Image: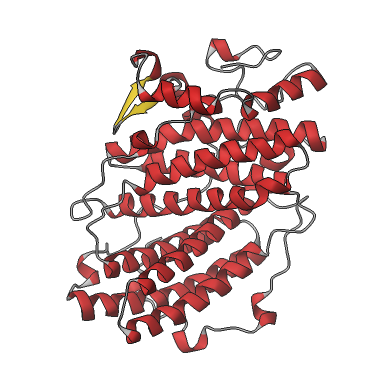
Amino acid sequence: MSFNPLKEKGIPLEKQVESWQQVYAEPYDKEEVHPYTRTRIILMNGIEVEAAIFKHQFARHCSDPDINRQLALTRAVEQQQQKIINWLSPANESALEVTIGYEQVAVDLTAWLARTEKDPNVKAALDFALLEDFDHLYRYANLMETVENKQAQKNVRDLTEIMPGRPTMLHHRHPFDNQRTPVDYQTADILTKLHILTIVSGEQQTMNYYMNVGNRAATMTGRALYQEIGQVEEEHVSHYESLADPTSTWFERLLLHEYNECYLYYSNLESEVDPRIKKIWQHCLEQEIAHLHQAVELLKQYDGMDAAEMLPDNFPELTIFQSNVDYVRDILKNQIDLTCDGVDYVNMNDLPSDHRFHRHQELVNSGLIPSQEVIQEQIAKNGIDYRLEVAGEHPIERFRQRQEVLV
């Protein structure tokens, strides 16, 4: 079904600020919610947080009071949208259960974006980090089984596998090696631009979540694991945000933010299975259409650019959550030993012994390594690590044994 938000009216801006009663939404039942309803909620929470952060940064770099007033109006609505969405998560869902949801987002969103990405540079960036988020899911699932006696299969069902990816201890690269080659937005496909903004927002939300909940973990190993993986999320945000075109104007970025929000709410609307949540996506879409129209006018007024010439007649292929088991296994088989050398992806075994990757590894991994320790504790408790192997044994032979901590 084709859809062009530029041709829709949406809810007028002056009618968008809502009462507390309207903003509050009943949380979902964690025992009944579909895993991909949860992932859509987590993603859109990150999208709205990015919207608020971006508009605050825009205002801090803008001296025009009229522009700042308009940004403040839509920013207030974005904040209300974020409250509606984030408050859908119930209080009886532990931080670790939510974390499993975050990592399921990271795996299946990244895999879908990579599968549909047209730019080889961006696809390579997605495939590379996919294997790291996949391993994070494995580490947190083992922590949850050890500490809370809960199995992550209940959260992810059989949609996303849980087993070792590229080991987390090998994710720690020198910051110089987390920078990619930017995309030229003058020639890039619209879907590439949307993919970059979406993945930056999602990874940023994960980074922020771990920064704030990691010190709430019940055990010292859990606290340490959040620290370690939280630092990798910083690497991922740097990795992805460096793909964005730094020459875009503030108004071009504003337009892309609003268009992406319309696109993702519409994507959710088309794939959501929960009728109550579907109404929330519909309402937010109608609000975002008006935000997009505001961005169109600002772009025309201050940059002299016509948004209709920059955006397609209809939305490109929608972003959806679906199982990506076979795709992830294929990337595992072919890219497990990759790391980065500047902007290039290389086999870590081919790096010279004095490369900064090795020096950085020696520095951060001296002593206890939380991502290894969490598996050791699980093996000590139950004899084997925790896995969910839907499509058979691990595709890489050296990762098939389950009684020892692997690297």
What residue appears at the point 71 percent right and 52 percent down from the top-left corner? 33
Query: Where residue 298 sits in the image (x, y, percent)?
Result: 28, 78
The answer to whether residue 156 is above or below residue 89 is above
Res. 197 in view: yes
Whether 402 is drawn above or below 1: the answer is above
Above-or-below relation of 264 to 141: below
Q: Residue furthest bottom?
A: 14
Compare residues 247 and 397 and report the one nearer the observer: 247
Residue 158 makes an appearance in the image: no
275 horizontally vs 233: left or right: right
166 left or right, relative to 378: left
Q: Quadrant of residue 41?
A: bottom right
Specify the quadrant that holds the N terminus: bottom left
| Residue in view at x 44 percent, y 27 percent | 360
- Coordinates of residue 133 in the picture (x, y in percent): 53, 36
Residue at horizontal 59 percent and vertical 83 percent from the top: 18
Q: Is residue 264 above or below residue 233?
A: below
Residue 104 image position (x, y, % from top left): 59, 42
Q: Nearer the viewer, residue 187 or 59?
A: 59
Q: Would residue 285 be found to the left or right of residue 405 on screen?
A: left
Instruction: Choose between 115 and 242: the one closer to the eye.
Output: 242
Q: Quadrant of residue 376?
A: top right
